[in-house]
Amino acid sequence: MGKINILSKDTFNKIAAGEVVERPASVVKELIENSIDAKATEIYVEILEGGEKLIKIVDNGEGILEEDMRSAFLPHATSKIRTADDLFSIVTMGFRGEALSSISSVSRVLMRSKAVDNDGREILVEGGEIRYEKFSPMDQGTLMEIRDLFYNVPARKKFLKSPSREGSIISEIVSKISMAHPQISFRLMVEGKEVLRTYGTGNQKDVIRQVYNKKVYENLFYFENHYDSFSVFGYIGNEEISRGSRSHETIFVNKRLVQSKVITTAAEKAFKSFATVSRFPFFVINIEVFPEIIDVNIHPQKAEIKFEDESHIFKSVFGTIHSAMGEGLKDTFAIEEEEEKESFVQLRHPSASAPVYIDIPVDTMKPVNAEEFQKKEHSETVSHQEAKSYESDAGLDIRIREEERPMKKAYWPEDSDESSAKTAKFPMPRIIGQFRDTYILTEIHDELYIFDQHAAHEKINFEKYMTEIREGAVASQGLLIPEIVDLDLEDHQLYLENREVLKEAGFVMEDFGDRSISIREVPLFLGKVQASFYLHEILDNIRNLGKGNKEDVKHLRIATAACKASIKAYEPLTMEEMRHLINELRFISEPFTCPHGRPTLVKLTEKDMQKMFRRIV
Ligand SMILES: Nc1ncnc2c1ncn2[C@@H]1O[C@H](COP(=O)(O)OP(=O)(O)OP(=O)(O)O)[C@@H](O)[C@H]1O
Ligand SMILES: [Mg+2]
């Protein structure tokens, strides 16, 4: 007798089922996808004991014809494709005709369904065997009840996690699928409790709010872009809602929940160029693509897909998200120059005894610009030396000895003759003090000026660094121990393309075999640094510039990235340090905004104060 056995139908089906049905959540996913394919607008899901005991799905879709009730459970039985050619024009979630046959071979399935102009029918299938089929009146739609999952495959059962863990895997998958289909109303009951409800408003952001929370909802940037063969749109969260894991990263391709390394990397890289912490972003990315240019048939649970041109997808996702975040962050900081509002003081605790807290609307604090000072004839052409006497004239008791307290971590090259003769853009204010180790409070005549010390510092560094780059005179520091960095394929490519530009900006590197490079010199103003951190920041910042971009655009990006990365939050400053910082700021060419366009200083007038305290109305 030969050694080759022909497996029984039962064994074969169980093996096939193992591919499709890994755990209860896979059943839930397959059944929901069937409901979606049936054009349901309402889908109800209920599970007991993590789905092992019961998974129930009810939809109001097209239903199944009376004569198709049995064939739905046969292997390779599908109404969705006819031939292999159709595989490349798939617009439905299902196409293999495997799910029901697989599920029913490892559980007991009761299915009731009614299609239009048909009678409702009910069928019970246990371990792949049809037990009965009968007439059963009902409304149009389909009900599926899957009981005792894996009752006949004990080995599979052993691999399941606790019911609560399986329950949360199911919740996660239902939540994610519901985001891809905002026009469908979903309801999920886990162990008798409603855990999710969406309302079919058609708006994805509404569903995100239901699935996550208000905080997530309020910290999202929308992005959208259209290309020849596909579109990208969705939401990316700011740093506030970033995570320590990838759990809040969701990708849909033609509404199918998939994992995709290319898309994930593109989105994470775009996020990283704006992040100050190393965490994973929140995102929901939707890609709508012509079915011809993807292959959905490469994974048993259809959880992965293959794109014809991965690098195009990468660039598009990166570019779309990167520019949306850039824009979004800019808007966040833009301060509108609105007219003063009539009542800008809100009393939160109006009771007599309680202290009164007031909200100062952002637009009460005005950003400052150069004209303002010119108008008031504050402008003066003075050297740094004169600036000091201006201050003494104003009766301040701070004696400044520059060499005594150079500002910590800051970059203060010797004043050059040229800068000494520059025009101060605003008068030296009287320093009142520091607030929250972040803001410097000062006054000039009857106005209160508040400086964002980090924005100011960043801008000073930025301007000096840019000047040095332009003049080909970047002050660099050699690293005692050169830092070796392994770059990924893409970063290495980018580094090779920009080696010269980086060198001009004070980053001197050498090839170190393979995709490793050794960083030998970095700009002086960065101080003691982990050079690779800056390199990554910079590469990310120049990544989505087209090849044709001029050097100076790249330099600008490099300087922006390096300066941003060099600034740390919260730093207590002495009076001298504050004065020094502000004095430096006065002499740069554009002191009123940071490199990202946010204000470096804002003001509040005496009149604003009087209004706030209701001395005047
Ligand atoms: N909820 C439902 N409403 C209407 N028809 C359904 C429903 N569920 C299943 N069907 C019918 O049963 C058939 C078999 O379903 P099954 O999930 O096994 O295969 P499929 O969806 O065609 O492909 P895949 O295996 O890729 O999911 C479907 O093609 C569809 O015609
Ligand atoms: Mg299916």
Image (cartoon, rainbow, N blue to C red):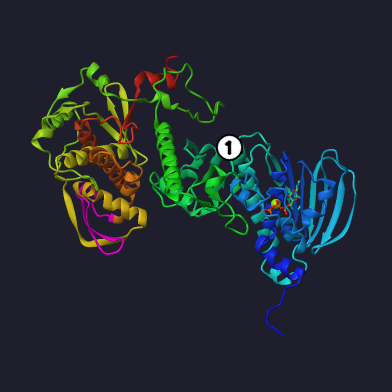
Q: Quadrant of residue 338?
A: top left
What is the count of numbered marks?
1
Image quarter (top left, top right, bottom left or bottom right) of the N terminus: bottom right
Q: Quadrant of residue 10?
A: bottom right
Instruction: Find residue 460 and report its horizontal and vertical position in percent.
Output: 24, 38
Is 135 a magenta residue? no
Instruction: Find residue 386 and report its horizontal and vertical position in percent.
Output: 12, 29
In the displayed structure, 571 sits above or below 338; it is below
**In the image, is 256 to the left or to the right of 104?**
left
Instruction: Find residue 371 and report its horizontal and vertical position in percent.
Output: 26, 20
Identify the secondary structure beneath mark 1: helix
Is 515 a magenta residue? yes
**Point 28% across, 52% down: residue:** 495
Q: Which residues are magenta?
A: 505-531
**Residue under label 1:** 205
In the displayed structure, 76 sits above or below 157; it is above
